Amino acid sequence: MSFGYKEAASFLKRDVDEKVLEQMRDKDLIDICVSLGFVDDDAYFFINSCRELRNNYSSPHPSNSMLDGVELNYFMHQCIKHVLGNDVQFLGFPVSKFMETLKKDTMTSSVIEYYTDKIKQANDLQKSAILKLTFTNS
């Protein structure tokens, strides 16, 4: 929500809103987080492993096997490190407004300052996408 549904939809090239997210499977939601740059490849590996452990050893997904104390400790450590410990707030970038502004050639100094600040707040994946969009669509 804080990233912005409209911005996420423009980066992902698919509809994204609260209703879509509520109906999404965990795996798909994790994949979206990777696509938007919220989760790096290392965190993806561990989060996905935790998801698999949860699916194979939780009460909604009964199993004949049991986790031992070491496996449970590892699971909890990875959850804390890669999910709960990541409190970075990512802000969306108003892609459609930015492209409109570029095409209209209305870049006043205040508009340039506004977009400069927005780009500085973007994560690396977003910055790369913004750069590609700027030079392919302007």
Image (cartoon, grey):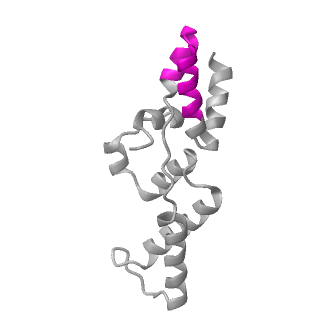
Give the magenta range.
97-119
Q: Residue at x 54, y 72 (%)?
A: 78
Q: Is residue 21 left or right of residue 121?
A: left
Which of the 4 image quadrants contains residue 15?
top left
Q: Is residue 135 magenta?
A: no
Counting the numbered discs, the total is 0
The structure residue drawn at horizontal position 51% and vertical position 65%, both measured from the top left corner, is: 85
Whether residue 117 appears in magenta in the rendering, the answer is yes
Q: Is residue 59 left or right of residue 105?
A: left
Vertical relation: 86 (above or below) 3 = below
Task: Report the side of 84 relative to 109 (left or right).
Answer: left
Q: Give 138 or 57, whichever is nearer the viewer.
A: 138
> Residue at point 56% right, 32% down?
117
Locate the N terminus by quadrant.
top left
Residue sticking out furthest to the left? 19
Looking at the image, is 78 positioned above or below residue 100?
below
Quadrant for the C terminus in the image: top right
Q: What x and y, as percent, mark residue 67? A: 48, 86
The chief SS type of the magenta part is: helix
